Amino acid sequence: MNIVNDWPPNKEQILARFPVEGVCVYLTYGDTIYNPTGGEIPEDFIVHEQVHIEQQKAYGGPEKWWNSYISDWLFRIQQEAPAYGAQIAFIRRKNGRAVAEKRLNEFVKYLKSPIYDCPLHALEIRRMLFRESL
């Protein structure tokens, strides 16, 4: 795994679909985590992005994965649920249940935001993330 303080090669495709210009985001392309804002990446987000690294390998590579991720909200949530689940499990082990619960609620709000544009009800998203964190 590499970390690069820049955008991934598909920057234009990402920005055309997701309103993330100037937002602190971490993006995985292949075995590299891209960090456009250049700040330190918290350990729990590295855990999250490592899940995406494995997903991209299993799906046939980053280009194919990103094409589906960008065009299909259901694929996107199916990829994010295990990544956020791993992140929540990591937070729970490191910081305890109360902190993990707070972060779970933050992740649900984020998935409901225009960035992810997930049409599922927040309660269903919460259930998905919680199930994946067990």
Image: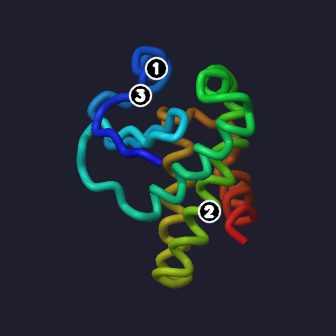
Between residues 115 and 2, which one lies in front from this camera angle?
2
Q: Are marks 3 and 1 in contact (CB under 8 Å)?
A: yes
The nearer-to-camera label among 3 and 2 is: 3
What secondary structure is marked by label 1?
loop
What secondary structure is marked by label 3?
loop
In screen coordinates, is 107 left or right of 23?
right
* Residue ID at (27%, 55%): 40
Find residue 64 and report its image quarter: top right
The residue identified by callout 2 is 86
Find residue 11 and report its image quarter: top left
- Crowd band around label 1 with a 10 angstrom C-alpha radius: few (<14), some (14–19), many (20+): few
What secondary structure is marked by label 2?
helix
Numbered tag placed on residue 10 in the rendering: 1
- Give the total of numbered labels: 3
Under mark 3, the amino acid is Pro
Which colour scheme appears in the figure? rainbow
* Residue ID at (73%, 72%): 134
Between residues 63 and 39, which one lies in front from this camera angle?
63
Alpha carbon separation for disc pair 1 and 2: 25 Å
The residue identified by callout 3 is 8
Q: Position of residue 77 (x, y in %)?
A: 67, 41
Which comes sooner in the sequence, label 1 or label 2?
1
- Crowd band around label 3 with a 10 angstrom C-alpha radius: few (<14), some (14–19), many (20+): some
Under mark 1, the amino acid is Asn
- Crowd band around label 2 with a 10 angstrom C-alpha radius: few (<14), some (14–19), many (20+): many
Q: Position of residue 49 (x, y in %)?
A: 52, 49
Find the residue positioned furthest to the bottom: 96
* Residue ID at (72%, 42%): 78
Q: Position of residue 50 (x, y in %)?
A: 55, 52
